Amino acid sequence: MTTLQSVPALGTHPASGSLPSRAETRDRLSKATYDLLVIGGGILGISTAWHAAQSGLRVALVDAGDFAGATSSASSKLLHGGLRYLQTGAVKLVAENHFERRAVSRQVAPHLANPLTFYLPVYKGGPHGAAKLGAGVFAYSALSAFGDGVGHLLSPAKAAQDVPELRTDNLKAVAVYGDDQMNDARMALMTVRAAVDAGATVLNHAEVTGLRFTRGRVTGAELKDRTSGDEFGVTARLVLNATGPWVDHLRKMEDPNAAPSIRLSKGAHLVLKRTSPWKAALATPIDKYRITFALPWEDMLLLGTTDEEYEGDPGQVEVTEKDTAQILDEAAFSIRDQQLSRDLITYAFAGLRVLPGGPGDTSKAKRETVVTEGRGGMLSVAGGKWTTFRHIGRTVMKKLEQLPGHPLGEDYESVSTLPKRLPLPGIANPNAVAHRLLVDGPAPGPRMAADTAKHLATHYGSLSFDIARMANENPQLAERIHPDAPEIWAQVAYARDHEWAETADDVLRRRTTLTIRGLATDEIRAGVESMLQK
C-alpha cells in the first residue's frame, strides 16, 4: 500500500480537460440566467437535468451535499421489474419497469450494469407455495419478453451448488428469475457527466439558503458554497425542487404554510464479507408482501432491506441496532449462520424512500413519482425508483413542457423527440475494456492486476483508459490504495479532476468502494484528503 508520506506528491498536476474550478463554476452560475435550476443532485434531479440539457435548455444543477450523496447511493443496487408488484396486479407497471431495466443494462449503460440471477427459495410453511412462485417467475420473465431466460423452478441441490450458504432444511424448491444490478453511486455520477456533456452547469456541496422571488414567483435561489463559505445566487426562469427527503423543507421556503406532501420510509442495508462464492442472489419472502435480499455485490454480500416509517431529520438517518438485528434475523430464513456473523459486517447504510403522503403501511405504499406546483410556481418532484430514472426525467420534462404560459419558452426540443436510448459516457463492452487494460500495460513496468482491470472496466467503461494513462505516466498512481481492494491511486486523482470529488467521503464512499469494504482507514483517508487539496 502506498505510504501516507508518498501520497502528497501524487497527481499534483490536474489532467488536461479537467473540470472548471469551483470559483469558475460559481461565477458562471451567478452571471447567467438559466432556463431551469434543478435543486437536488439525487438521481431524479440528475436525470431531469440530463434530459433538459439534451432538449437545448440552459440548465443548472446544485446539491447541498455530493451528487447521489444521500438516498441515491443508499439503494439495494438493483435495476428490477419489481416481482412483488405482480401480486397487486400491476402487470403494466412491471412491463414498463422491465423495459427501462433492459434499456439501461443493454443499451444505455452496459458498462455499469450487469445481469444477476435470482433464486427465490420456497420453504415448507412459507408464505407462498412452489406452484404459485413458479407461475409468478414465469409471468415475470414473460413480461420482459424472456430476455433474461424463462423463469422456472430449480431443485434445492442445484441451487445449493451455486449458493453454498443457502439453507436447505425444509427447502422444497427454488424459483429462478433474472434482473440486473449496478453500483448506484457510479451510475448517478455518469449521468451527471452526461448532463454536463449536454451543456448543464453543475455544482455539489452548494446549499440553498433561500429562494429568489420576482413578483411572487420563484426565480432562482441563494446559495452557499459549503467548501469555501462563498455566497452566491442563481437566477432561473423555472426552479425544480428535486431534494428527495428534503422536498417539503424547500416547499416551505416557497410557502411557509405549505402542507406536508410526502412521508418517508427508511431502508437499511448491511455489507458483509463473503465466506464462499455466490453465483446467484437470494430473494426470500418474509411475508405476503416483503422480500429480503442477499446480493453478491462488489465482491461482498449485501443484505436488506427494512421498510418502516421515518419521521426524524433526513440528514440523521442511520442504521440502528434494531435494523441490524432485523436484517440478520430475516436473512437467517435462507442463509446459514456462518455467513451471518456480525464479525463479517464491513459497512451499514440507510436511505429514505420518498412516498406520497397518506395513511397505511409504508411497505404497501406505491413507489410512484409525484410532481406538484407551489404557489410561487416552483415545481417539486419526489418519489419513484432507481430502475425508471430515465423515464422519470422524461416525465418531469413533459410536465414542464405543458405548464401554462410556457415559462421555459418554446424554443427547444420536446423531450418526445430526443433519442430514446442515449448512452451514458464510457459505454463499452466491459469485458473488452478489461482485456485491453491487461494487454496495453506499460512495456517496461508491471502489468495491471486482473481485478483492477475488471473493476475499472465495470465502473468507468472506456473512460478506464484515461485512468490507465495516468497510472502509466506516474507509477505511484498505479499502486493500490489498499492491498485488499482493486482500486488504485489514479482513481483518486481522476475523481478530483473529472468527477467533482471534494471530500474524502466523496471518493471513498461513492467514487470507489473502499468504505463499503471496510477499508477506509485513517491513513488512507488522510492520503485521499491530501491528494484532493492539490
Image (cartoon, rainbow, N blue to C red):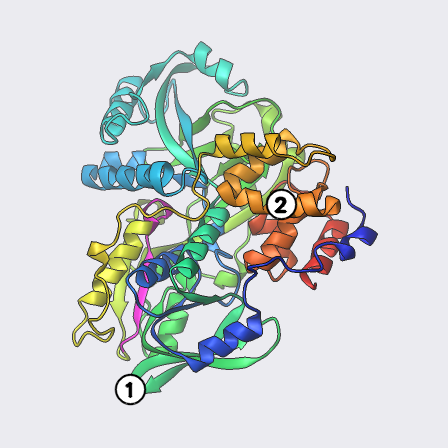
Residue 301 lies, in percent from the top left, at 55, 33
Q: Is residue 157 left or right of residue 491?
A: left
Tell me the tag on residue 182.
none
x, y percentage for residue 336?
55, 22
Quarter of the figure with residue 108: top left
Region rendered in magenta:
377-389
Disc 1 marks a residue whose amino acid type is: Gly
Q: Amino acid at mark 2?
A: Arg
In the rendered image, residue 379 lying in the magenta stretch gets the answer yes
Which residue position holds label 2?
469
Q: Nearer the viewer, residue 6 or 350?
A: 6
Compared to 413, does 170 lie above or below? above
Rendered residue at 37%/24% (across/down): 126
Residue ID for mark 1: 216
Q: CA distance from mark 1 to mark 2?
A: 53 Å
Q: Looking at the figure, which quarter contains the N terminus?
A: top right
